[in-house]
Image (cartoon, rainbow, N blue to C red):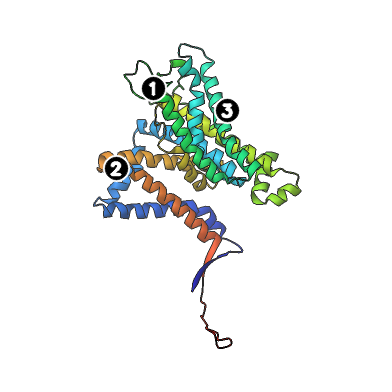
Amino acid sequence: MRIELEKRTRPSGFFTIASPLLALALTLFFGGLMFWALGKNPFFALYSFFIDPLTQVWSLHELAIKAAPLILIGVGLSVCYRANNWNIGAEGQFTVGAIIGSYLPVTYYQWHSPLLLPLMMVMGMIGGALYAAIPALLKTRFNTNEILTSLMLVYIAQFILDYLVRGPWRDPQGFNFPQTRDFVDQAVLPAIWEASGRAHWGFIFALVAAVGVWIMMRYTMKGFEIDVIGRSERAGRFAGFSARGMTWFSLMFSGALAGLAGIAEVSGSIGHLQPSISPGYGFTAIIVAFLGRLNPLGIIVSGLVLALTYLGGEGAQLALGLSDKIARVFQGMLLFFVLSCDTLIAYKIRIVWTKARNAVIGGTK
C-alpha cells in the first residue's frame, strides 16, 4: 500500500478562496484544545488572546506597530513568491536595513536636519536591497538555491548587528549596555496620532506599499511579467521576458521593503539599535504572505491577524500565566493549516494497493 497525491483537474473555486478562513478556524479550534490541555478555560483564553487586545485604543496602536513590518515584508515576499523566487531571508534584510539606515543618526549624532529621516529610510531600503542581491547573484551566477543562501545570510546579519552594538557603535554613555546612542528627534518617525497612542508612520508606509504593489501587479506590464515567469519560465522566455532579470528584480524589491521595515521599526518603535530588534518579523511575514494569498490587499488583513498573535501572546502571559512563546505556537499552527488546506484543495489523496508477488525464475527466488 502506498499513498499518492493526485492533482485535481478543477480545484474548487469556493474552497480556494475560503482556505485562509478555514485554516484560521482550525487554528482557533486546536488552539482551544491546547489551552484546555494546559488546564485553562479555552473560551477565556481565546478571548484574552484575540479579542481583549482590540478593546482599548492604546492596544490598537500597538497592533498597528506590530502589523507594519509584517505587511511591508509580506508584500515584498509576495512579489518574490509569485515570481517563483523563494526568499526566506527577509529577517536578515530587515536587520541590514536597520543597520544601514541607522548609520547617520549613530555616526553623526549631532546632525539635526529635516533631511535626516528621509535619508535614513532611503538608506534602509538600499541596505535591504543590496543584502538581497547576494542570493540573487549566487542564483543567477552559480545556480545556487536561494532558499539556503537567503536563510544563512539571516544569521550573518544578526551577528553583524550584535558586533556593532557591543563594539564600535556602543553608546559610550550607556553604562556598558549593548546599544547605540538614542536617536535625535529628527531621526525618529513621528506618531500618526500622538494624542492617543504611539503608532507611527511605518504603518502608513505599509499601507501605501500594499496598494502600490497591488496596482503594479494588476495594471502594469511588470506585474504581468512577474505572473508569467512565475507560472512558466519557458512561457516567459517566449514572451521576451528574462528569468534572470526577474530574479534580480524580485529579490531586491523584496529586500528593499524588508529594509524599510527594519529602519522604520528601529526609528519609530525602539529609538536606537540593540542586539534584538525583531521578534521574528521576517519569518512570520512568510505566513502573512501565504495567508493573504500572495495578494497585497489580502496581506494587509493577514498582517493584522498575525500582529494580533504577538499582542495575544503578551496578554496570555499576563492573564493566563503562560509563556509569550504561545504566539509562536499559534503562528506555526496557522501556517500548517494554510499549507494543508491548500494542498488538499489542489490535490486529492489516493491509496494505491499493490500485491507482492514472488516470481521464481530458473529456480531462483
Q: Answer yes or no: is residue 74 visible.
A: yes
Q: Closer to the camera: disc 1 or disc 2?
A: 2
Q: Quadrant of residue 179?
A: top left
Disc 2: which residue: 323
Which element type, helix, strand or loop, lies under badge 3? helix
Disc 1: which residue: 195
Q: Amino acid at mark 2?
A: Ser
Q: Earlier in the sequence, mark 1 or mark 2?
A: 1
Where 365 falls versus 243 (above or below)?
below
Q: Closer to the camera: disc 3 or disc 1?
A: 3
| Residue 103 position within the rendered picture, expressed as x and y whole percent measured from the top left | 49, 21
In space, the residues marked 3 and 2 are separated at their CA atoms by: 37 Å
Residue at 51% in and 25% down: 100
Q: Answer yes or no: is residue 192 visible.
A: no
Q: Closer to the camera: disc 3 or disc 2?
A: 3
From the viewer's side, name the closer residue of 78 and 32. Answer: 78
Residue at 42% in and 27% down: 163
Residue at 54% in and 57% down: 14
Structural crowding at the residue carrying mark 1, measured as other residues with C-alpha within 10 Å and reported as few (<14), some (14–19) or many (≥20): few
Q: Amino acid at mark 1?
A: Ala
Q: Are marks 3 and 1 in contact (CB under 8 Å)?
A: no
Structural crowding at the residue carrying mark 2, measured as other residues with C-alpha within 10 Å and reported as few (<14), some (14–19) or many (≥20): few
In space, the residues marked 1 and 2 are separated at their CA atoms by: 32 Å
Q: Earlier in the sequence, mark 3 or mark 2?
A: 3
Disc 3: which residue: 126
12 on left or right of 174? right
Q: Are marks 1 and 2 in contact (CB under 8 Å)?
A: no
Which element type, helix, strand or loop, lies under badge 2? loop
| Residue 246 position within the rendered picture, expressed as x and y whole percent measured from the top left | 66, 41
Q: Amino acid at mark 3?
A: Ile
322 on left or right of 16? left
| Residue 250 position within the rendered picture, expressed as x and y whole percent measured from the top left | 61, 39
